[in-house]
Image (cartoon, helix red, strand yellow):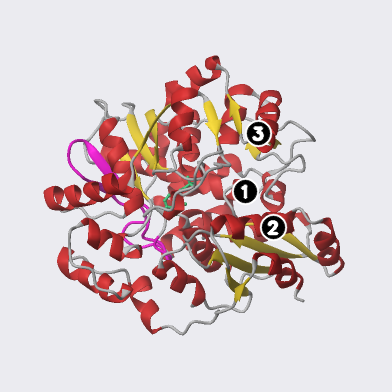
Amino acid sequence: MQFTTTRGAGQPVSAARAICLGLAGDGGLFVPERFPSVDLKETLAQPDYPALAALILEKFLTDYDPAFLRDTVRQVYGEAFGEGTAPLRAAGDGLYSLELWHGPTCAFKDFALQLMPRLLVEAKRMLGDGSTTAILVATSGDTGKAALAGYCDVPGVTITVFYPSHGTSEIQRLQMTTQQGGNVAVYAVQGNFDDAQTGVKRIFGDADVARQLAARGVHLSSANSINWGRLVPQIVYYFHAYGQLVRAGALKAGDKADFCVPTGNFGDILAGWYAKQMGLPVGKLICASNKNDVLTEFFATGVYNARRPFYRTTSPSMDILVSSNLERLLYHMAGADRVRGWMKQLSEDGSYRVDPEVMERIRADFGAASADDATAAAQIRELFEQRGYLCDPHTAVAFSAARRNKSEAPMVVLSTASPFKFPRDVLAALGRPLPRDEFAAMGALAEYTGQPAPKALACLRSLPERFDAVIAPDALRDVVLGE
Ligand SMILES: *Cc1c(COP(=O)(O)O)cnc(C)c1O
């Protein structure tokens, strides 16, 4: 299996090279040149999550040794995740919640970021690349911690995370500043997520930085979902959810299921579309957004317009105006020539319009809806009071969108974070009194709901903070160059 770029330049590359490179040389994203099909019966017959993951990954990562893939997914998904890896819970009215937050950092990003470092190290070995990979991450919260946990003490790799000094939840901040490991560094950047992200993007585009680092045998890479290695592990849990629906008797093998995905960078939902291309019986994929509803508008009008106000919401991991992975969908639907034109318009004018006939094909597979903070909060309360089901604000946005797009088919909502990552917002949604302190809020939430806070979050209170540096956005370059 080879990978081409969404902007059409250059020769196709192997999976190992696509994972090492991250972004293609023409500024595009790597995509598989075709979609391998899988036999639905075979996926349903797999005994557990690691076996299913090996079956799916082998179809795309054909240059990796299948024995390496089988061992690695067993280590990652067998050991690092609890509660059956990705359990499906019934939430009433034909809705189901696929809980993707039982990994080490309590966010769905663990599915990709626990595996990708191992794929990267193996890729470098296969390609004879002895350089040091310096991973730079700008994060609004979850990506930073999940990447730190995944790359901690991985040989030949260093990781530096930049988070906005005003932007993450207190729990998310502590998850990062208490990170262990000899190859990790964490900085707060004065300002909001855009300031941190712009600083990191500037470094990736700085030829002088690249030259100075190359002289020391170092090259930069990203842990962002533009990397193919982050997308492919996410395909697996769509098959896993479907298998659980069949086993629960909620549908017959071959019948369609709908999925609703809380969306930011469009990576998680795109993995669902890839599963559909491989033969999973998926009806609609519903793209759920918060008040930053650029995608909802896009699916309704065909116009992608990033020139709009940016809102900070209670679902910060979806506070995004430029959804990078949409470019991959547009490539599959319309080809490289049109994608190049649209991306040029996006960078020059901040918007582009997709042809109606392309939108018609996109709408055959996708629906979209948005929910503001108050709607999400009401959803948290309703689910808990009527069904005893507790969810976080990102998942609540998706539940709200799912209800408005429900068909006859079962609807699986992807639950992307533990509610205990956002204890104050969840307590407030439940109409409970608010303690000032985050850990008191975590305790109050556990007490009121009768559910324990995940150990990885509760223990943050007693861990020493290792990183306290706050830097100006223009100091990123010096940090990366070690000056
Ligand atoms: C990253 C994240 C999302 C958005 O996922 P994308 O792949 O960027 O669309 C949703 N919810 C949570 C909790 C996240 O951390």
Residue in view at x 17 percent, y 53 percent: 384
Q: Amino acid at mark 1?
A: Asn
Sequence-earlier tag: 1 or 3 = 1
The answer to which quarter of the image holds residue 67 is bottom right
In the rendered image, residue 50, in percent from the top left (x then y), is placed at 44, 53
Find the magenta span and give its range: 81-106
Q: Give how far apart the Cα atoms at labels 1 and 3 are.
A: 26 Å
Q: Is residue 35 left or right of residue 282?
A: right
Residue in view at x 67 percent, y 59 percent: 199
The answer to which quarter of the image holds residue 304 is top right
Instruction: Say whether marks 1 and 3 touch (CB < 8 Å).
Output: no
Residue in view at x 65 percent, y 24 percent: 335
* SS category of the residue bearing label 3: helix
Question: Can residue 427 be seen here?
Answer: yes
* SS category of the residue bearing label 1: loop
What is the crowding at mark 3: few (fewer than 14 residues within 10 Å), some, or many (at least 20)? few
Judged from this view, the residue extending furthest toward the left is 386
What is the crowding at mark 1: few (fewer than 14 residues within 10 Å), some, or many (at least 20)? many
Q: Is residue 431 left or right of residue 184?
A: left
Q: Amino acid at mark 3?
A: Asp
Sequence-earlier tag: 2 or 3 = 2
Q: Is residue 220 left or right of residue 182?
A: right
Q: Give how far apart the Cα atoms at labels 2 and 3 are.
A: 28 Å
Relative vertical location of residue 237 with respect to residue 189 in this rendering, above or below: above
Q: Amino acid at mark 2?
A: Ser
* SS category of the residue bearing label 2: strand
Sequence-earlier tag: 2 or 1 = 2
